[in-house]
Image (cartoon, rainbow, N blue to C red):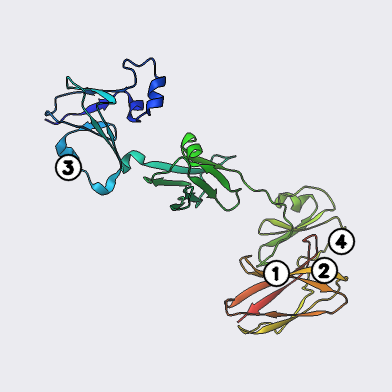
Amino acid sequence: MKTICLIVLCSALTVNTSAQAQQQKESASKNSDTIRLRCSGTLAANDVLYVVDGFLVTDREINLLDPTDIVSIDLIKESTTKIYSCYTKPKPVVLITTKKANRKILHVVDAKTNVGVSAASLHIASTNAAKVMAFIADDYGRYETDSLIADESLITVTATGYQPLQLTGKQAKKARYRFELKPIFVELKEITVMAYSRISCGRGNAKMSALKMDELAGRFVCLAAGVKILETQSKKESAVIAEQAKIKVYPNPVAASGTVQLSFSDLKPGVYQIRLSSASGQLLYSFKKQITGKNETQQLPVTNAMPAGMYMIQVMDENKTLLQSSKLIVQ
């Protein structure tokens, strides 16, 4: 007869060591643990009781289990544990844990707004790095898994625009697998404008209000796609929106696997950093150059790893201030 049973003392599913058992002086039986099972019916006379994910099951139900779904099997012998159930005498118990019991939802949220962080990356590594798991959260910052996460595992959570978060599996379990990421606030040093169709400028109260800027008379502000790129207190009615490139690049465009010549002007003697970035802002390589006089040159190789498209060449000083820039077209 099929019987549905409920384990009343869930904490007893963990087998205590003999040292732990000796400390349980309030137990009804010394040096032993007790599991009480409340049954709604009777079972056939079995030599062993089977408990799957907290429920007592029959031999037939055991045979229906998929072996690939089983995570762990533990045996509690009657010599160390007394089992009280529908039976009159203690019996050994086999505790079976399946993947269903380990199913959990990992949730990555913004620590300030509590909104899920889209496409957050979760990297889980064991202490000996023998087993590594990697997950990517959905648009709501969630990922559902039935994989075991050990207490000693190291979990690293990363997402664009947020500080990385590291914690152990035990800490994650205590937080109910909710990961709060703190946003990164970076002071804007430079802006690369790829298209000038969305640039708007204004000076005075009327246009400042439309641009959602400070309504201070005499201030001239230019925005590119909503980002401030120029601000001046000049009383003139005109301002330079995009300064002409001071780096002379030739040939431009350049064929793949070619070489371009850079010519620098109006730079004081000193050490400068030359950067080459893709149109998306990815830094391809960077190097330092000592400039001793005007109109110095530098050769820049174009490799096969650079696909056709537009690139940015920038010159920065030791304080990482952008001084000069120019576009490079690779055909």
**Mark 3 residue element:** helix
| Residue identified by numbered label 2 | 271
**Label located before the other in sequence (1 or 4):** 4
Location of residue 91 (image quadrant): top left
User: Residue 236 has which mark?
Assistant: 4
Disc 1 to disc 3, how far (Cα)? 64 Å
Say whether marks 1 and 2 touch (CB < 8 Å): no
**Mark 1 residue element:** strand
Say above or below: 316 vs 62: below
Disc 1 to disc 4, how far (Cα)? 38 Å
| Residue identified by numbered label 3 | 63
**Label located before the other in sequence (4 or 2):** 4
Q: Is residue 31 left or right of residue 126?
A: left
| Residue identified by numbered label 1 | 286
**Label located before the other in sequence (3 or 4):** 3
Instruction: State which mark lies toward you, 3 or 4.
Output: 3
**Where is the N terminus found, in terms of image quarters?**
top left
Disc 1 to disc 2, how far (Cα)? 13 Å
Disc 3 to disc 2, how far (Cα)? 75 Å
Regarding residue 275, the answer to whether it shows in the image is no
Q: Residue at x 82, y 48 (%)?
A: 216
Disc 4 to disc 2, how far (Cα)? 35 Å
Instruction: State which mark lies toward you, 3 or 2.
Output: 3
Residue type beneath disc 4: Lys
Residue type beneath disc 1: Ser
